[in-house]
């Protein structure tokens, strides 16, 4: 439904013409069945008409369409409160404020109902939060509301407008920085927070957000220095101690991180979030048994802490017992379980049932977890296909010929690209076991440059990429390449070559070759059904929204093949295709082929990659600490009867020209 139609419905509701509004809403839902606003408006109309059971039914539909929609829980609270069910209404209001901090009506209701139920502490905290929000400028509350609903363009526009008349308003600067982070504009977010600290240098919240942005930009040394300075202002503060510990992790000081987490736990007791972070540090450090023990301590303290369950599942080496499965299923029945805890648990149960060869229940849970993630996403496969198509239209043979080898001539980088779960971590571990190669991380530098080129002067609402590539000058190409080498230096040791293992860089090979013409590029590829279903089973932290649907991931794989075929034709002999199945079938031959392409002499350490003690931060961290094995090649076949949408999407690959 367009904006004019929405405004007409809102006008009817303001005029209390609820039956008329309902008629318009039914017509709107007939053509836009996944529009959360229409379900919300319908529930409001039904409540005002005192049709409360119908309103609650519509709200259940709304939560299926948009799982984190705060107003759905607020409206549910209003209905339940009207029906006199105060305890359940309070739970709904809690979920409303958890998903949208700007819902004043929910905070007010929480304070009132908690007071009626003699929940003194909750009543006091809710009243304090309501007072804080009431003291904020109305524009700030509106921006918070828009952000919670994922309306990033409107939030950005309102925030910029507010800052024009309030240029030193630190809260607005912090919110605009948060929007920038969400839109990938990390450099501008960093600048905004630096500016905010000029106006309020002692603002601890701003300093913490600044540390997080520096970490996302992988400026780990700087983030560590800021976190340490903040911690030194109050070494007994457990949150500041934990933040400092996280930055120690990022710089490879895992022993220091674990000690700091232990210090924080002396104050916090068995606090599950800190115990889970401690487990992550131990896992990355390679101390798997101790990591498992830390995750288990977190679950003993809070059985519904989904992140710890998923961390155990994500190790890929932990076998859940029946008691674990029962406990996870019991947690899923709790109404007060957060949406993210619920998602973590669904993926963990998917792995637990898979290990027990109960593939029907396993798939059910993987599907539920992915459906919940997809409901929070605005990813559209067609938009991604259009960008891939534009890459082929913009980065043409004529453009490459015109630019020549104008970029920065360094041959240091080895880019490993492809889809997640295609074996890129294995290839990285093999190469990083060579004395002439530094392993690093999934470096964000290329993607940050793409975001900068894409957005122009705004975080959102504009998309100049990839069309802008045709406008780059030789000087800009060289400057971008030199900047990349300079900014990635922090992740290197002393080897002449280093690896950038950001999988999604395959979308930007044109840009990479324009700015770094001598860079090596390795395409890590895996059999499509195996690769796609492995991605569907993996709960990615961010950046892989195509993986939440079998149809979307199949579509994406086909687009990937078409684009890689184009890059291979445009840069003949410059991109090495390595099939995971070939690596497993003839390991030494493929290792030698990989080293030959990179211009490296053979070293036995590359065959013994699993003995490399370097920290590995991806989902495959435990798998690459084991020798090559074949058991994972055909795992997808256990689920074959459920994968028809994926097979159908992959079958369309011949149409992608």
Image (cartoon, helix red, strand yellow):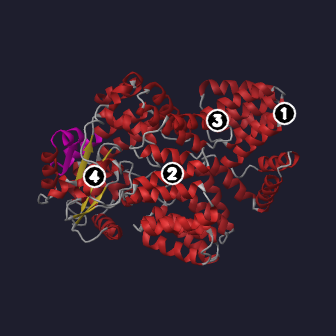
Q: Which residues are magenta?
A: 562-586
Vertical side of 113 occupied by 450: above or below: below
Gap between marks 4 and 3 measured at Cα: 39 Å
Gap between marks 3 and 1 measured at Cα: 21 Å
Q: Which mark is residue 36?
A: 3
Gap between marks 4 and 1 measured at Cα: 59 Å
Between residues 2 and 240, which one lies in front from this camera angle? 240
Q: Which residue is mark 1?
A: 16
Q: Position of residue 142 (x, y in %)?
A: 70, 53
Which of the marked residues, 4 or 3, is nearer the chain's N terminus? Answer: 3
Is residue 137 magenta-colored?
no
Between residues 287 and 108, which one lies in front from this camera angle? 287
Q: Which residue is mark 2?
A: 295
Which of the marked residues, 4 or 2, is nearer the chain's N terminus? Answer: 2
Q: Position of residue 522 (x, y in %)?
A: 23, 50
Q: Residues within 10 Å of mark 2 (few under 14, many from 20)?
A: many
Q: Residues within 10 Å of mark 1 (few under 14, many from 20)?
A: some
């Amino acid at each position: 439904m367009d904006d004019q139609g929405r405004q007409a419905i809102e006008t009817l509701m303001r005029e209390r013409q609820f039956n008329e509004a309902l008629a318009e809403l039914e017509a709107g839902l007939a053509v836009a069945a996944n529009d959360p606003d229409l379900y919300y408006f319908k529930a409001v109309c039904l409540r005002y008409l005192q049709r409360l059971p119908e309103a609650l039914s519509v709200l259940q539909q709304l939560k299926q369409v948009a799982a984190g929609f705060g107003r759905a829980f607020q409206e549910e609270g209003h209905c339940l409160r009207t029906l006199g069910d105060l305890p359940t209404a309070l739970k709904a209001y809690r979920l409303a404020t958890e998903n949208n901090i700007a819902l004043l009506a929910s905070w007010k209701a929480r304070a009132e109902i908690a007071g009626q139920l003699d929940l003194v502490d909750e009543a006091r905290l809710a009243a304090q939060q309501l007072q804080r929000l009431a003291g904020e400028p109305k524009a700030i509350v509106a921006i918070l509301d828009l952000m919670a609903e994922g309306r990033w363009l409107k939030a950005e526009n309102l925030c910029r407008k507010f800052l024009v008349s309030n240029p030193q308003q630190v809260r607005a600067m912090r919110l605009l920085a948060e929007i920038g982070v969400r839109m990938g504009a990390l450099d501008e977010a960093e600048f905004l927070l630096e500016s905010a600290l000029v106006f309020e240098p002692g603002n601890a919240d701003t300093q913490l957000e600044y540390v997080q942005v520096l970490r996302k930009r992988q400026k780990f040394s700087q983030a560590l220095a800021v976190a340490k300075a903040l911690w030194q202002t109050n070494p007994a503060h457990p949150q500041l101690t934990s933040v400092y510990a996280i930055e120690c992790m990022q710089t490879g000081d895992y022993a220091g991180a674990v000690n700091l987490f232990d210090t924080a736990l002396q104050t916090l007791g068995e606090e599950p979030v800190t115990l889970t972070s401690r487990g992550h540090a131990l896992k990355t450090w390679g101390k798997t048994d101790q990591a498992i023990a830390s995750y288990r301590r977190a679950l003993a303290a809070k059985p519904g802490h989904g992140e710890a369950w998923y961390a155990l599942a994500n190790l890929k080496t932990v076998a859940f017992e029946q008691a674990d499965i029962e406990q996870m299923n019991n947690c899923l029945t709790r109404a007060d379980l957060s949406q993210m805890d619920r998602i973590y648990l669904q993926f963990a149960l998917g792995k637990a049932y898979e290990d027990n060869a109960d593939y029907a229940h396993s798939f059910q849970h993987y599907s539920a977890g992915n459906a919940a993630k997809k409901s929070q996403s605005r990813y559209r496969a067609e938009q991604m296909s259009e960008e891939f198509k534009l890459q082929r239209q913009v980065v043409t043979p004529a453009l490459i010929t015109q630019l020549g080898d104008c970029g920065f001539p360094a041959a240091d980088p080895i880019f490993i690209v492809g889809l997640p779960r295609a074996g890129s971590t294995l290839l990285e571990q093999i190469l990083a076991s060579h004395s002439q190669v530094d392993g690093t991380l999934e470096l964000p530098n290329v993607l940050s440059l793409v975001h900068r080129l894409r957005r122009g002067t705004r975080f959102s609402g504009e998309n100049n990429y990839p069309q802008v590539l045709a406008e780059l000058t030789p000087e800009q190409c060289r400057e971008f390449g030199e900047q990349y080498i300079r900014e990635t230096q922090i992740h290197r040791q002393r080897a002449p070559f280093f690896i950038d293992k950001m999988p999604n860089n395959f979308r930007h090979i044109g840009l990479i070759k324009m700015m770094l013409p001598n860079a090596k590029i390795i395409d890590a590829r895996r059999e499509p059904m195996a690769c796609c279903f492995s991605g569907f089973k993996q709960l990615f932290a961010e950046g892989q929204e195509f993986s939440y649907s079998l149809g979307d991931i199949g579509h994406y794989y086909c687009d990937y093949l078409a684009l890689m075929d184009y890059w291979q034709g445009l840069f003949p002999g410059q991109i090495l295709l390595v099939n995971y199945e070939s690596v497993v079938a003839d390991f030494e031959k493929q290792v030698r082929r990989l080293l030959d392409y990179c211009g490296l002499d053979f070293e036995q350490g590359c065959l013994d990659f699993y003995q490399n003690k370097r920290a590995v931060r991806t989902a495959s961290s435990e798998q690459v600490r084991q020798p090559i094995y074949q058991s994972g090649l055909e795992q997808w076949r256990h689920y074959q009867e459920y994968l028809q949408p994926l097979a159908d999407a992959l079958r369309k690959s011949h149409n992608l020209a």
